[in-house]
Image: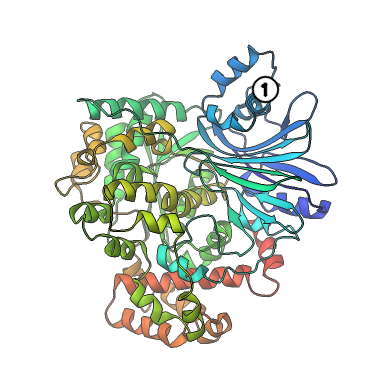
């Protein structure tokens, strides 16, 4: 696991490259490596997980004409190494990434078809005309951001947005529709980020840049759905998940699991505990008494599976101190309050000595776990409006009241979702659950969940591994008939069946609950978060941004004080996150100040 960066067909200084690398050192503190010439560079920061003494990047062939930097894990690297050795290739170590130059040498741009894992890869190919190839995995577990300048033909890339902004050619100019896109889906979906210059390579994509043709971004075919499950669907799913967790447990460093107290992470913990040895599992809770506390369920899972239980408790009074660090590492706003919890949880995991953690992310998307999915399945004729409202911080009719007149006019000329995403969410057409699942997998999962997990785990040098996002599990889940995902008012039918007998009944029978902050209760007069939000969302700050009406925000606070409401609380929270992001990245001098903070984080 690493952080990668570089450029092609442009000129950068040594100082720029050193700064870009330094801004990602938290994600790769175990080693740094780079190679550069007058018109290109590739570099990485290494988090050593496999073959701790090897793994020197850039990886390259003996003649040096193919260089590769890589972020992620290739779980079938032993099989690929054997295949490549039979062709005469040799390898300096047993690191998973060391097979990549040879694999590219054999298969060219189609080398990703042979990979099973999570990855963002950059290949510098100098065999004929120089070219740069970038590639992402099948669901976007490892993000890769880039800036393409068609005028100069220069491309810049990095694993994280703050590092990419350290290239002088990458500006922090805001993408004007970004605020509306953010409030409509809690973070921008698709390839565009909140910065006009910066895009994110989509899942299952390959980008090729050369001097003759410029940049071409190609969407590869995602793994096809598996064969239709037979009669023993739950038995097959249980066996597949057990196998995936076993594969993902392989590491040369200590590994733990995250247990929120629900089905998804609990089942991962149960399978991980079956392999023997002490498995340590971590749960996060909040100091004091709050609605939705899950620690009792998480403790039951640990006791049932024999895992060593770690209770991480954070004080809500520290949330204002965490906010800037969390928003900085994310690089752009994410309105889910879970971001603070995620950051604090992975900090505790690393402090306890663990560099790898298994999580339950992705199960809801693959197996149909969201209430909005259930509602759409029960009303197939007219579901899109309610579904879109469920995705948003606030419904469209309420968002419009927040904006200044000038920004409201700008919003009227733009759409918050990419065109294909909007097409998937139309009421017309057959198979609404299938189209919703495609939307969730292609857009919401990578943008809203996977980037959060990646950035906030790697902020503390922890590699998060996600069994539900593995290629075979995704293919199996996508092939399930609707009745095995959602039916009879119940969600994740197949997954609950696979968990039967492995988890406590209290966990299996409890109502579904997201792992997040009890925001409505915490955002109340007299609480630390309330005072911090009121100060940050002051009228003078909002006026300087020119997009949010200060009077509308004052009214939100009045509503929340008089009649606490989930929508008002989340809207205040989302605007707070946006304002912190704006202060960190958009105010004069923000880049230098933020960079200093990040390098010591």
Res. 291 visible in picture: yes
Instruction: Examine the rendered structure and indicate whether residue 532 appears above or below residue 64.
Output: below
Residue placed at 49% from the left, 27% from the top? 250
Query: Residue 557 lies in what quarter of the image?
Result: bottom left
Residue placed at 33% from the left, 51% from the top? 436
Closer to the camera in the image, 538 or 548:
548
Query: Residue 363 lies in what quarter of the image?
Result: top left
Expressed as whole percent of the image width and height from the top left, the position of residue 96 reads: 60, 27
Image quadrant where one finds the N terminus = top right
Q: Residue furthest right?
A: 38
Q: Residues within 10 Å of mark 1 (few under 14, many from 20)?
A: some
The residue at which mark 1 appears reads as 93
Res. 354 visible in picture: no
Is 311 on the left or on the right of 367, as rendered? right
Is 209 on the left or on the right of 433, as rendered? right
Closer to the camera in the image, 109 or 583:
109
Image quadrant where one finds the C terminus = bottom right
Instruction: Examine the rendered structure and indicate whether residue 408 appears above or below residue 209.
Output: below
Instruction: Examine the rendered structure and indicate whether residue 597 appears above or below residue 505.
Output: below
Closer to the camera in the image, 226 or 216:
216
Query: Residue 231 lies in what quarter of the image?
Result: top left
Expressed as whole percent of the image width and height from the top left, the position of residue 483 reads: 19, 40
Instruction: Examine the rendered structure and indicate whether residue 29 appears above or below residue 279.
Output: below
Expressed as whole percent of the image width and height from the top left, the position of residue 101 reads: 68, 28
Residue placed at 63% from the left, 37% from the top? 70
Expressed as whole percent of the image width and height from the top left, the position of residue 526 reads: 38, 78
Element marked by disc 1: loop
């Amino acid at each position: 696991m690493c952080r990668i960066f570089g450029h092609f067909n442009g000129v950068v200084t040594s100082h720029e490259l050193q700064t870009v690398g330094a801004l990602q050192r938290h994600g790769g503190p175990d080693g740094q490596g780079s190679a550069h010439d007058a018109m290109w560079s590739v570099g990485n920061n290494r988090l050593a997980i496999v073959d701790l003494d090897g793994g020197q990047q850039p990886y390259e062939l003996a003649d040096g004409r193919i260089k590769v930097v890589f972020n992620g894990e290739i779980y079938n690297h032993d099989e690929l190494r054997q295949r490549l050795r039979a062709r005469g290739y040799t390898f300096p170590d047993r690191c998973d990434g060391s097979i990549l130059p040879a694999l590219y040498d054999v298969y060219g741009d189609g080398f990703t078809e042979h990979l099973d894992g999570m990855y963002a890869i950059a290949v510098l190919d100098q065999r004929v005309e120089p070219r740069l190839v970038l590639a992402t995995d099948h669901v976007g577990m490892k993000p890769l951001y880039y800036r393409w300048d068609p005028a100069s033909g220069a491309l810049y890339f990095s694993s994280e947005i703050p590092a990419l902004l350290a290239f002088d050619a990458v500006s922090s100019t805001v993408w004007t529709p970004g605020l509306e896109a953010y409030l409509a889906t809690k973070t921008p979906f698709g390839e565009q980020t909140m910065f006009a210059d910066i895009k994110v390579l989509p899942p299952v994509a390959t980008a090729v840049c050369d001097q003759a043709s410029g940049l071409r971004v190609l969407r590869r075919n995602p793994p096809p759905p598996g064969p239709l499950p037979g009669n023993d669907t739950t038995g097959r799913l249980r066996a597949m998940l057990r196998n995936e967790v076993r594969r993902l447990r392989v590491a040369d460093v200590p590994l733990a699991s995250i247990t929120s107290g629900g089905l998804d992470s609990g089942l991962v913990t149960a399978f991980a505990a079956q392999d023997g040895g002490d498995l340590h599992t971590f749960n996060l809770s909040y100091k004091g008494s709050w609605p939705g506390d899950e620690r009792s369920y998480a403790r039951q899972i640990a006791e049932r599976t024999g895992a060593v239980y770690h209770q991480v408790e954070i004080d809500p009074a520290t949330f204002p101190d965490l906010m800037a660090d969390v928003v900085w590492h994310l690089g752009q706003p994410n309105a889910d309050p879970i971001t603070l919890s995620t950051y604090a949880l992975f900090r505790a995991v690393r402090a306890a000595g663990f560099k790898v953690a298994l999580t339950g992310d992705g199960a809801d998307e693959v197996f149909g776990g969201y209430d909005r999915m259930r509602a759409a399945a029960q009303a197939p004729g007219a579901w899109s409006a309610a579904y879109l409202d469920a995705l948003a911080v606030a419904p469209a009719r309420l968002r419009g009241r927040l904006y200044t007149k000038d920004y409201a006019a700008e919003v009227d000329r733009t759409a918050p979702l990419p065109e294909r995403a909007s097409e998937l969410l139309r009421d017309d057409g057959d198979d609404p659950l299938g189209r919703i699942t495609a939307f969730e997998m292609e857009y919401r999962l990578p943008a809203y969940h996977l980037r959060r997990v990646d950035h906030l785990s790697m902020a503390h040098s922890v590699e998060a591994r996600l069994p539900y996002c593995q290629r075979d599990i995704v293919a199996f889940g996508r092939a399930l008939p609707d009745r095995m995902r959602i039916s009879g008012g119940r969600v994740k039918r197949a997954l609950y069946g696979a968990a039967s007998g492995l988890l406590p009944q209290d966990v299996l029978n409890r109502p579904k609950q997201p792992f997040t902050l009890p925001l409505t209760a915490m955002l109340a007069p007299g609480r630390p978060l309330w005072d911090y939000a009121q100060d940050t969302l002051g009228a003078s700050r909002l006026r300087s941004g020119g997009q949010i009406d200060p009077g509308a925000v004052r009214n939100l606070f009045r509503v929340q004080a008089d009649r606490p409401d989930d929508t008002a609380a989340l809207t205040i929270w989302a605007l707070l996150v946006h304002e912190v992001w704006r202060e960190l990245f958009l105010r004069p001098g923000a880049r230098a100040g933020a960079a200093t903070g990040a390098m010591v984080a």
